[in-house]
Image (spheres, rainbow, N blue to C red):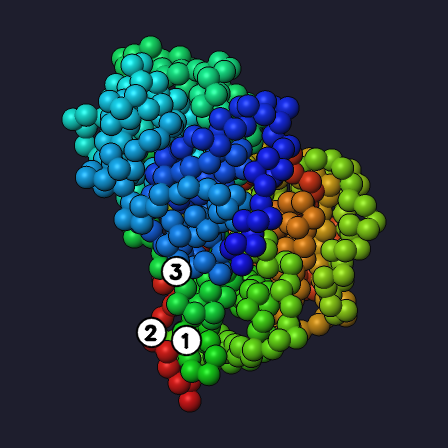
Amino acid sequence: MCHDVLNQFVYETAFDRNIGWTTEGEQQALRRKRVAIAGMGGVGGVHLLTLARTGIGAFSIADMDRFDLPNMNRQVGAMMSTIGEPKVDVLARMARDINPELRINCFPAGVQAETIDGFLEDADLFVDGLDFFALDIRRKIFARCAELGIPAITAAPIGMGTGYLIFRPGGMSFERYFGLAGQNDREQYLRFLLGVAPRGLARAYLVDPSRVDLARQRGPSTAASCQLCAGVVAAEAIKILLGRGRVRWAPFHQHFDAYRGQLAVSWLPFGAAGPIQSVKRAIARRVYGAMALRAPAVPPSPPSDAIEAILSLARWTPSGDNAQPWRFRRCVADLVTIDIAIDRSNVYEYRDGEPTLLSAGMLLESIRLAASLWRRRIAWTHEFQTGAGGSPIHRITVRFTPDDAVSADPLASVLTTRSVDRRAYRLRRLSVQEKQRLADCLDSDLVMSWHETWRDRLRLSRLGAAATDIRLRMRETFAIHNAVVDWRAGPSKTGIPAAALGLPWPTLKLMRWAARDWRRMNWLNRLGGAATAMVQMDIAPGLQSAGFFSVRFAVPDTPHTVDAILRAGERLQRLWLTADRMGLAMHPALATIAFAHYGSVRAPFTADTRLRPKATALAKGVETAIGPVRDLIFIARIGEPYRHMVRARSVRRDLAELLEGKVVDPA
């Protein structure tokens, strides 16, 4: 078979479309060249295939690793059919499938200090495809290239771009540029990162800094950046190998970021380790040090099976104040029990914990969607249990059943991206088709109403502001807010990041100061702090949106039973995910319902009797604007966001924290 393939292959025909950008003579010159590539992973593998398609005739390739599932997002050789195979073997096979004439020297043990010379033998160019953190062997290879007179390129995949440097024999060396000698590992990583990305273009769209931890050798990557690395390296390789075109040798540095559509060219005469860059290094130590504090000390273990994978995806369900009030217990025969705890001391848990039960219903819909990815359908049952201290626990038992008729639900793809967006939205009204698509997510026992005129938006915004006024003046909610608001930078696993509250930084600073003592908060409220928060958190964003919608039971006076609320939660989660998939943002207003409920039933929800008339007035306002409070399930602001990226958001606890005990038989 191989003989037949060789008979069919004609080099000149295979690479004829290169002619025009190269001459026929230059194409034959490339055929005689050898490129050494260390690393066959994210960038190294695509380097090899891209350079093979330029018509280069010989390669030396090295990698000691095998393909695994975490390689799938970016490595060109990573496929389900290649998991467990040596990367060198897979990439050599793929390259020979492009050009059967290729002369490839494989180094399946990677490049070791004693094999550097053999790896670089007859090489006309060295291309760095090593892992970011493999600095020791990288330094040795670059040093030997300088001694042997071999040009060398390093292109780092950064965000959705690439930062790259080209080192010329006799010019500024790799070691001089980066200044790694004598530095500890963490400082070396920092200097290498700043050296390949001195402008830090990708920092502007890093949405989860907790995923960057230089000390523990962890960082995110994308296929886009790997492909861009291969593109720029191929262009520079052609210039170097053919001796034509301008090459910006180090200390020139180039960084192209496709996400920002920006090219930065830097000239660092003293290298990245020079005194000019010392200020950047000092700032970067603080920035990346803060990121490391947000990163988990131990990365989450991958799911052990399909059920854990389903639960890991479903845990991204929204819950009030990001409380995540559920704990999972694995059972035999594809059963999972979920215990839902309701904090009855929390004033926001109106109607015997309805907000938590709505979230539990959303969790069930998330489980159903995630299970569809593994071709499983689910069925659930609910019962009451008695927890520690006699407190009631809602226990839900979920049964997973394999079913080849189940297809992947597209809404599963937005489970992890859906988030509360408290910012202002565009004023564009939703179309009739968009509103119908959202309404179709609900069952016939629920009805959706729209409040989108300027007058409606003002009225609903004022109702939200009235609820904010009550909760900021209540001593009972002071401790709740202190426990929930996370003042640290970045995402929060157990609360709401302060930066996600939608407030300008002067207000946030005042809030942080007042949050230390109730007397400060009380004084600030009397001074107008509550009124300021009402305008900034409710009035302004409420007016700056497409409108509000409310969801209620279709039949008046429908009992708010546990099953009815759970099923309403399922539908609301589907609605929310559909909105996210449509590019829309949402901000629920459950505090409005909570205090309107207390006002409608005249419940003594606070020791401050001055606030109870405010709740009564709020209830009357809700009934005038929307209808009877007793039938109301959900209120939310909705619209098209100006920016879809939410930098500060609530994330979720690791699955290991939500899983309790071992697999048990529920009987």
Q: Which structural element holds mark 2?
A: loop
**Residue 565, labelled with which disc?**
none
| Label 2 crowd (10 A; few <14 / some 14-19 / many >=20) | few
Say if 28 sits above or below 423 in the image: above
**Residue 661, labelled with which disc?**
2
**Quadrant showing the N terminus:** bottom right
The residue drawn where x is 46% and y is 83% is 333
Task: Return the residue found at the far top.
Answer: 269
The residue drawn where x is 71% and y is 72% is 558
Q: Which structural element holds mark 3?
A: loop
- Depth check, mark 1 against mark 3: the one in front is 3
Whichever of callouts 2 and 1 sits on the residue coming sooner in the sequence is 1
Say if 357 sits above or below 182 in the image: below
Give the image location of residue 638, x and y in percent.
Answer: 68, 45
**Which residue is more in the foreground, 125 or 163?**
125
| Label 1 crowd (10 A; few <14 / some 14-19 / many >=20) | many
Number of marks drawn = 3
Answer whether labels 3 and 2 touch (C-beta < 8 Å).
no
Relative to 431, 51 lies left or right: left
Give the image location of residue 93, x and y in percent.
Answer: 46, 51
| Label 3 crowd (10 A; few <14 / some 14-19 / many >=20) | few
Residue type at the position of mark 1: Arg
Whichever of callouts 1 and 3 sits on the residue coming sooner in the sequence is 3
Give the image location of residue 468, x and y in percent.
Answer: 56, 44
What residue is disc 1 on?
330
The residue drawn where x is 44% and y is 48% is 91
Quarter of the image where one finds residue 220: top left
The residue drawn where x is 46% and y is 62% is 312
What residue is disc 3 on?
84
Mark 1 to mark 3 CA distance (whole Å): 29 Å
**Which residue is more in the foreground, 107 or 358?**
107
